[in-house]
Image (cartoon, rainbow, N blue to C red):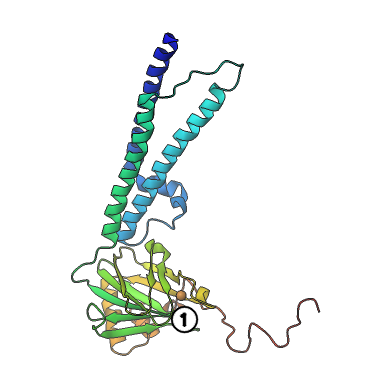
Amino acid sequence: MVGKTSVARPRAVRLAGLGVGGVTLLMLLAGCSVEGVGSAFGHFGWPGKGISLQAHKMYDLWIASVIAALIVGVFVWGLIFWCIIRYRKRGDELPVQTRFNMPMETLYTVTPILIVAVLFYYTAIVQTDVDKLSKNPDQVVEVVAFKWNWQFNYRNGIGPDAKTVASTLGSSDVIPLLVLPTNETIRFEETSKDVIHSFWVPELLFKRDVFPGSVRNTFEVTLDKTGRYVGRCAELCGTYHAFMQFELVVVTPEQFQQYLTAKEGGASTEDAMAAIGFTGDERYAVTTKPFNTRRQGQSWNQSNATAAGK
Ligand SMILES: [Cu+2]
C-alpha cells in the first residue's frame, strides 16, 4: 500500500510538469508566427487578416485563441485516449486511485484560471484598442441606414451638428459605394431612419449595430489595404434585408481627395469614380450587384400563378 502511493505521487507530479511544460512550449512556438499558422489553416473561418490596423489586432487575437484552445483540446483528448487504452478493464483489480492528489488538484484548478486570465487580458486590450476614438479623426462618415439601403454622408466634423459636404445614396438599381482612403483615421457615426440595422464589412472583421433615434454608434478604423470589399446589413431588418448591400472602395489618400473634391463639386458617384481612374463598369460596384426586388412588373403573389396542388 505504501509502495503504491509513493509511485503514484511522483508520476502525477511528472505528468503535471510535462503538461504545463508542453502547453507553454507549444504556446511559445505558436506565438512566433500567428499569421503563418492562420493562413495555413484557412484563417480558422475568418476571411483573412483584414484590411485595417484594428482588424489585424483582432485577427491575431482570434488565431492565438484558437491555437490555445486547440493545444488544450489535443492535450485533453490525449489524456482521455491514454486513460481509455492504458486503464482498460483487464480484470477485477482497480487501477491506482489518485483521489485527493494535491499536485493534480492544484494543476487542474490553477491552469484553467491562468488560461482564462491570459485570454481575458488580451481580449480587454484588443477590445479597448478597437473601440478607441481619436480626438481629431481625419475623415468622418455618417452611415445612414434605412429599409432597405444605405446613405453615406461625408462630414466636416464630429457629431450630429456637423455638416454633410458630400453624400452617396443607394437605390434598388445602384449599389452605394463608400470610397475611403488608406492611412487615415476614419470615424463612422451610425444612425438609422427606421429599425435596427448593422453595418458590416466582412474584411474589416467588424460589425456594429445601427440604431434609430438618439443613439449614435461610433467606431474608427485606419485602413491599410486598397481594394474593393463588399458590405452588408447584418441585422435582420425586414423583407429586403438580404438586398441591403454596399461596397467599400479603399483608395490612396490622393485619390480620395480628388474623389471628394469631385463629389463636393456636384459630380455623381460614377463621375467622381471616373475622375480617380475607374472606368466603364469599374465606376459601379464590382463585388456585388443589385438583386431583383420584383417591386415592379412582378410581385411575390403573382396573379397568373397556379396555386400549389391545382
Ligand atoms: Cu438592414
Q: Name the secondary structure under disc 1.
A: loop
User: Is 66 placed left or right of 185 in the picture?
Assistant: right
User: Is 157 placed left or right of 180 in the picture?
Assistant: left
> Is residue 13 visible from the viewing direction of this image?
yes
Where residue 286 appears, as percent x and y from the top left, is 46, 73
| Residue at image coords 25%, 74% | 139
Where residue 109 appears, as percent x and y from the top left, is 36, 35
Where residue 135 appears, as percent x and y from the top left, is 18, 69
What is the three-letter code of the residue carrying label 1? Lys
User: Is 185 placed left or right of 309 in the picture?
Assistant: left
Where does the N terminus fall, quadrant-wise?
A: top left
Where residue 23 appears, as percent x and y from the top left, is 37, 34
Instruction: Name the residue furthest left.
Output: 135
Q: Is mark 1 within 8 Å of ligand 1?
A: yes
Q: How many marks?
A: 1
| Residue at image coords 35%, 38% | 27
| Residue at image coords 46%, 36% | 74
Where does the C terminus fall, quadrant-wise?
A: bottom right
- 268 to 246, vertically: above or below: below
Quadrant hosting residue 170: bottom left
> Is residue 278 visible from the viewing direction of this image?
no
